[in-house]
Image: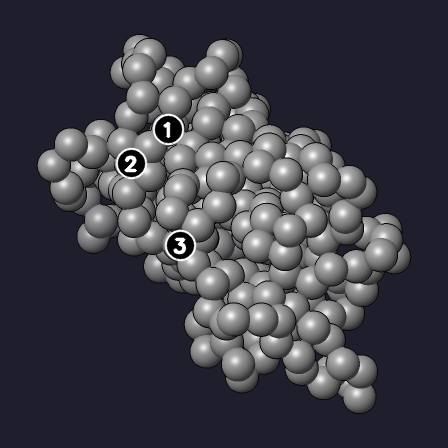
Amino acid sequence: MSLAFTKMHGLGNDFMVFEAQHEASLPTAAGWRELADRHTGIGFDQALVILPPRTAHTLAYYRIFNADGSEVEQCGNGARCVAEWLRRQRQLSGPIRLESCGGIIEARFDSEELVSVDMGEPRFFDDDEVELSIDSTATRFTRVSMGNPHIVIWVPDIHSAPVAQLGPVLESHPMFPQKTNVGFLQFIDREHARLRVFERGVGETLACGTGACAAMAVGRRTGRFASAVAIDLPGGRLSLQWEGPGSHLWMTGPAVVAFEGSIED
């Protein structure tokens, strides 16, 4: 028995994408870790499993598994890749609605390999920044959900940000029983910022779509960002639009097919 898959990426945040009719046949956590290995497996940040829809007026339900075998609620770059995969497989053109355990989103196709996704309204956990003492140093951040948990830390220079040092400590801090994604955000001007993200269950990735959405939400909330902002990540640029509370946040970026293959069981 063979499993056909598509290797895709959004700004270098890479995925194994495949369709399944039944969830019982999905790999175990150990199986996902084997497939994610970049030396002996396929290699990916996350696996995206496309399943039959569970809710009326949605095209598909999808599940997201990290490279460490854990399952997560949402993935912005992954959502664009799922939408692009469905567009190619089913010759779609108009907007589509997709569901994950993080909720229902809408995706539209702006051009070849460029997808916009309605990521919903950001949800903040606190009225102001939170401060933690890490190695006797005060670290301030904002907690926000984009269907999955994020914290955003302002930094003066993204290149010298302590991503490798602070990322894993904060990801697994007792404050976050389900762990969290950790974003390091540099303000350039009202329409431009830079971002690096340490993703829970993966580590630092070349791009994090929900991380960029969380950064946009924090920037708007603090009055630093305009309603449309370009955020540069190590893998490239995402465009974000958010008018503010009461409105939905839109993310636009590429969804690219790298190759197709199959696994022999």
- Residue 249 shows in this picture: yes
Q: Residues within 10 Å of mark 3 (few under 14, many from 20)?
A: many
* Real-space Cα separation, disc 1 to disc 3, in angstroms: 16 Å
Q: Image point 34% across, 53% down: which residue? A: 102
Find out whether the residues at labels 3 and 2 contact each other: C-beta distance under 8 Å: no
Pinpoint residue 19: horizontal percent, then vertical percent: 30, 34
Pinpoint residue 35: horizontal percent, then vertical percent: 49, 48
Q: Secondary structure at mark 1?
A: strand
Q: Which mark is residue 41?
A: none
Find out whether the residues at labels 2 and 1 contact each other: C-beta distance under 8 Å: yes
In the image: residue 7, left or right of residue 99: right
Q: Residues within 10 Å of mark 1 (few under 14, many from 20)?
A: many
Residue picked out by circle 2: 98
Outermost residue, bottom direction? 136
Quadrant housing the N terminus: top left
**What amino acid is at disc 1?**
Ala
Q: Secondary structure at mark 2?
A: strand
Q: Which mark is residue 147?
A: 3
- Residue 19 shows in this picture: no
Pinpoint residue 74: horizontal percent, then vertical percent: 41, 50
Q: Earlier in the sequence, mark 3 or mark 2?
A: 2
**What amino acid is at disc 3?**
Gly
Q: Earlier in the sequence, mark 1 or mark 3?
A: 1
Find out whether the residues at labels 1 and 3 contact each other: C-beta distance under 8 Å: no
Q: Earlier in the sequence, mark 2 or mark 1?
A: 2
256 or 160: nearer the viewer = 160
In the image: residue 105, left or right of residue 74: left
Quadrant housing the C terminus: top left
Residue picked out by circle 1: 107
Position of 109 relative to 37 (above/below)? above
Position of 100 relative to 173 (above/below)? above
